Amino acid sequence: MKWHQLSPSDANDMKGVPLPRARPSPRRRIWIPVAVSFIAITVLWAYLYPPQDYTYPVRDWFPSEPARELTDEETAARVVFRQILSTPPFPSRNPKIAFMFLTPGKLPFEKLWELFFKGHEGRYTIYVHASREKPEHISPVFVDREIHSDKVGWGMISMVDAERRLLAKALEDIDNQQFVLLSDSCVPLHNFDYVYDFLMGSKHSFLDCFDDPGPHGVFRYSKNMLPEVRETEFRKGSQWFSIKRQHAMVVIADSLYYSKFRRFCKPGMEEGRNCYADEHYLPTLFHMMDPAGIANWSVTYVDWSEGKWHPRSFRAKDVTYELLKNMTSIDVSSHITSDEKKELLQRPCLWNGLKRPCYLFARKFYPEALNNLMNLFSNYTIF
């Protein structure tokens, strides 16, 4: 084919004649739907699996159920929570961990904890809620650390009241940045430096939270909690937590959702339901308000392998180096649903996105195990 240049007269004759449109290439036509599909998949993935280091709840972008008009109380509560969660903690020159002991009376492992705290003065504070009798301390680090306490009933809302009482007292110290709830049967699994670096360096609070479709889970839900708490939001978890200062503030600031659990989550409810607020209130609250801010596992090890109402208790003969090292090596959080399927739910313990061993503390230990624990302490807490 020969190409030739148009003369000026030919060019004038061509004015007004539409030029043929270039056909889009097949590659370009394929690229557009591929890009749209990729964006849709990315958004859906972010909704279903929010990133571990994301600060605010991704689910707020796409409500899990059709939107409804919030009550005045809900609107006010959410404004307060968002303000707390979006405000950085007050900078502290000496950040500390608040160790909060929830106990009926004496603390049988005071000497072990004294060994744990030794040499780290100024980096921790201790608070003791003794619900039955004032303990007689054998360690000076626990002297005069009791707060105003009240009676606590197993499975009752008074258990949550005691936790909130401890948090309120610990929040008075502006240097307290992490808040760990412990029982009288808890012991440390690592040395203080390891625990301090683990908690202070984490972007998340360590609060156990999972969906149990069985009789010990969602069956305990009461529709009287509507509209604020929906059945699809009801969660379960261990009461033993370690939470950041912002989350501790949320617990203290909440009255709306707390009042729902106070009224409608208790033993002996309608239709034979036995709801225990200390297992459901905090997991449900934070699943609703800041699901990406919690790790969904507890840093306190508990052995439920016996399948009883209470976890396994360890006697002196059970406490060996192998037992304790095994506890410190577990890096997967496990739950078993209470329905007929008895499904094993497992998830890796992620610390700022990295897989790490899960547990810093363990329970339940009999007082008779103290000597064995003291003798083994320097060996199993090397790391």
Image (cartoon, helix red, strand yellow):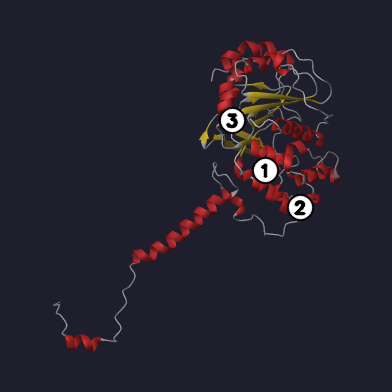
In the displayed structure image, the side of residue 33 where residue 283 appears, left or right: right
Q: Secondary structure at mark 3?
A: helix
Q: Secondary structure at mark 2?
A: helix
Q: Secondary structure at mark 1?
A: helix
Q: Nearer the viewer, mark 3 or mark 2?
A: 2
Q: Which mark is residue 199?
A: 3
**How many other residues sit within 10 Å of disc 2, few (<14), some (14-19) or many (≥20)?**
few
For image coordinates 34% across by 66% down, the residue present is 26
In the displayed structure image, the side of residue 124 where residue 255 appears, left or right: right
Marks 2/1 in contact by CB < 8 Å: the verdict is no
Q: Earlier in the sequence, mark 1 or mark 3?
A: 3
Which amino acid type is shown beneath numbered disc 1?
Answer: Phe
Which amino acid type is shown beneath numbered disc 2?
Answer: Glu
- Residue indicated by mark 2: 73
Q: Quadrant of residue 208?
A: top right
Q: Nearer the viewer, mark 2 or mark 1?
A: 2
- Residue indicated by mark 1: 286
